[in-house]
Amino acid sequence: MQNPVQQQLPAGLRVLLAEDEPLIAMDGEAVLRGMGVQLVVLARSVSEGLNAIASSTPDAAFLDLRLGADTSVPLAERLAQAGVPFAFLTGYQGDAIPPTFKDRPVVAKPFTPDLLLQALLAMVPKR
């Protein structure tokens, strides 16, 4: 039997989580899977994220704004080109988000399960 959260999400949902901090990535994956996300693809770098997108386009994505010394802007650009909804998952505030992506949702770190769920539901309403 599905829990109420799982009933709100589309079945078979695949989410890319681009996060370079291992503990945050593991926590995010556990939270998303607990919500009923079928597949969480973790990417610790821009290159891992681009490879993940190339091999299987996700239904939605959460992007840490900073991935090591890089930004996740190349991932955001690729996802936008593919029409994949995404949100930034970051501790940065204000002007840190590039102007091109100011309209995208931002989930502030440290995040809560409720914040992730709200952002995910806004990105992928039940089909």
Image (cartoon, rainbow, N blue to C red):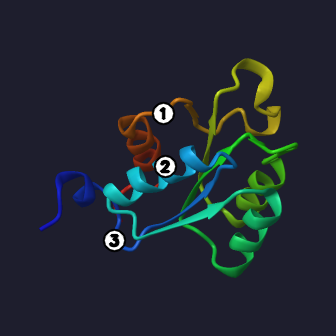
* Direction left: furthest residue: 1
**Front of the two marks 3 and 1:** 1
Q: Which part of the image, by quadrant, shows the C terminus? A: bottom left
Q: Quadrant of residue 13?
A: bottom left
**Which residue has dot 1 on it?**
111
| Residue 86 percent across, percent down from the top left | 61, 50
Neighbor class of circle 3 (other Cα within 10 Å; few <14, some 14-19, many 20+) is few
In this rendering, is residue 53 above or below 84?
below
Tell me the element at label 2. helix
Tell me the element at label 1. loop
Rounded to the nearest whole Å, what is the CA distance between mark 3 and mark 1? 24 Å
* Amino acid at the residue labelled 2: Gly
In this rendering, is residue 25 above or below 101?
below
Q: Earlier in the sequence, mark 1 or mark 2?
A: 2
**Which residue has dot 3 on it?**
11
Neighbor class of circle 2 (other Cα within 10 Å; few <14, some 14-19, many 20+) is many
Rounded to the nearest whole Å, what is the CA distance between mark 3 and mark 2? 19 Å
In this rendering, is residue 30 above or below 65?
below
* Amino acid at the residue labelled 1: Phe
Labelled pair 1, 2 in contact (Cβ < 8 Å): yes
| Residue 63 percent across, percent down from the top left | 66, 48
Rounded to the nearest whole Å, what is the CA distance between mark 1 and mark 2? 9 Å
**Which residue has dot 2 on it?**
28
